[in-house]
Image (cartoon, rainbow, N blue to C red):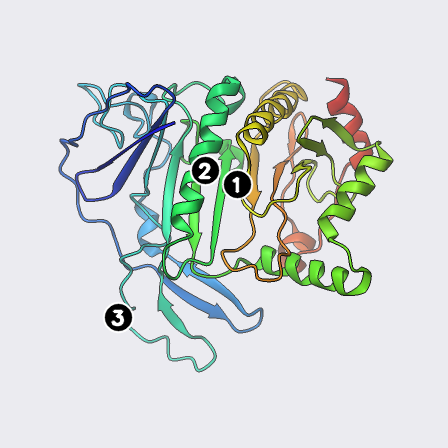
């Protein structure tokens, strides 16, 4: 893999990732851009002990532009984009409208609440462009290109984890207007958080309790149980397994686990990365053949936090869709939104069977 680093007109970092060592990209961004906002802040919710990111400047971010004005396509004479190159394989750059910033400044005003501490919204948000083809899907990538994306995730996870103050790195893809995606070009994002996210913190609490009670690893036990049952399994390769979790929250949900326990993407071997890419592409293509139209989905990498002294983390990918039938979406209604108590409309065993049959 060849990595090329440059900067955009406003000082943000841009990285190109190529399989061809001879690949060359322009080093100059000809645009004139305003400075990126550094006013993000964090406020602690005293009822849940969870940090909430405040980024009011994001109200003005780019929203569903026409294809000819897409900011993630390669630059051309008529459209100077975030990527000042006539072509690229994988490109990653700092978000122009970040929720978190390494240059975040202290808030100007105090919230005047003794139970709500406020601090600068330190961190980093990056955009990951999987391909220069605006009309492609991740599922359209070759195994080689999908593996390059995994290598890029690994590169960024390793580098962002070294930033003083970063506690967790989250790589993810959101696809489909149904879940709020504002740019149609195939892309994902990476967040480097200055805290451990609520879901990870809760998973670690449960994993710790399971270890204290049984002496075993929770994720390994889940994996063993799914493989033994078989009814929710989609596929097993040399290095990975894919299954619908027995207590799936979403209408269509699949978890992908490496058979070898690792905490983060950088720990995967070259063989494990390539094997994952092939399996993931297969699952995505099954997703898109489940109904008459491609499924909107979120693909979320669950990596251990930077500090995991008790080694409770087990890397896995959670892939899920909000579409519950061909023409209906799963909305987070009263129970889900108000109480975080999910109601699932389809049995995991039925979804697994349908995905296997595709």
Which of the numbered marks, if any, corresponds to residue 153? 2
Marks 3 and 2, the one that precedes in the sequence: 3
**Residue 108 disc label:** 3
Tell me the distance, in whole angstroms, between the alpha carbons under discs 1 and 3.
Answer: 38 Å
Observer-nearest of 316 and 38:
316
Question: Considering only order in the chain, which callout, 2 or 1, is on the residue closer to the N terminus?
Answer: 2
Mark 3 neighbour density, 10 Å: few (under 14) some (14–19) many (20 or more): few
Residue 138 horizontal/vertical position (percent):
50, 24
Question: For the residue labelled by badge 1, is the local secondary structure a helix, a strand or a loop?
Answer: helix
> Relative to the observer, which residue lies in front, 330 or 219?
219
Residue in view at x 32 percent, y 54 percent: 101
Tag 2 secondary structure: helix
Please say whether residue 347 is visible from this viewpoint. no
Q: Return the residue nearer the eye: 57 or 298.
A: 298
Asked if the residue under mark 2 is in contact with the one under mark 1, i.e. CB atoms within 8 Å, the reply is: yes
Residue drawn at the location 28% of the way across and 37% of the way down? 14
Q: Which of the two labelled residues, at mark 1 and mark 3, occupies the earlier sequence position?
A: 3
Query: Quick one: quadrant of the N terminus?
Result: top left
Q: Which mark is residue 98?
A: none
Q: Is residue 146 left or right of residue 183?
A: right
Read off the residue under disc 1. 265
Q: Give the image quarter of residue 127.
A: top left
Q: Position of residue 353 (x, y in %)?
A: 80, 26
Percent x, y of residue 20: 35, 19
Does the residue at mark 1 contact the one at mark 3 (Cβ under 8 Å)?
Answer: no
The image quadrant where one finds the C terminus is top right
User: Disc 1 and disc 2: Cα gap in Å?
Assistant: 7 Å
């Amino acid at each position: 893999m060849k990595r090329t680093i440059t900067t955009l007109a406003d000082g943000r970092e841009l990285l190109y990732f190529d399989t061809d060592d001879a690949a060359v990209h322009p080093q100059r961004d000809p645009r004139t851009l305003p400075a990126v906002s550094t006013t993000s802040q964090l406020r602690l919710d005293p009822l849940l002990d969870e940090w909430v990111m405040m980024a009011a400047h994001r109200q003005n971010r780019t929203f569903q532009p026409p294809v000819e004005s897409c900011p993630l396509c390669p630059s051309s004479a008529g459209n100077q984009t975030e990527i000042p190159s006539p072509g690229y394989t994988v490109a990653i750059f700092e978000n122009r409208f970040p929720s978190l910033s390494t240059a975040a400044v202290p808030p100007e005003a105090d919230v005047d609440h003794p139970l709500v501490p406020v601090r600068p919204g330190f961190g980093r948000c990056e955009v990951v462009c999987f391909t220069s083809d605006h009309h492609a899907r991740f599922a359209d990538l070759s195994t080689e290109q999908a593996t390059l994306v995994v290598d890029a995730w690994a590169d960024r996870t390793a580098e962002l984890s070294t930033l003083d103050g970063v506690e967790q790195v989250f790589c993810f893809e959101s696809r489909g207007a149904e879940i709020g995606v504002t740019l149609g070009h195939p892309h994902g994002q990476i967040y480097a958080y200055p805290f451990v996210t609520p879901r990870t913190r809760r998973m670690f609490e449960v994993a710790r309790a399971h270890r204290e009670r049984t002496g075993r690893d929770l994720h390994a036990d889940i994996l063993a149980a799914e493989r033994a049952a078989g009814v929710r399994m989609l596929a097993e390769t040399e290095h990975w397994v894919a299954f619908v979790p027995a207590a799936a929250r979403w209408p269509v949900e699949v978890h992908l686990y490496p058979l070898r326990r690792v905490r983060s993407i950088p720990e995967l071997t070259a063989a494990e990365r390539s094997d994952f890419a092939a399996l993931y592409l297969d699952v995505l293509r099954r997703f898109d053949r489940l109904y008459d139209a491609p499924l909107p989905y979120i693909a979320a990498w669950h990596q251990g936090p930077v500090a995991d002294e008790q080694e409770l983390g087990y890397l896995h990918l959670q892939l899920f869709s909000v579409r519950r039938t061909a023409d209906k979406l799963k909305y987070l209604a009263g129970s889900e939104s108000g109480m975080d108590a999910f109601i699932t409309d389809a049995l995991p065993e039925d979804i697994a069977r349908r995905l296997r049959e595709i």
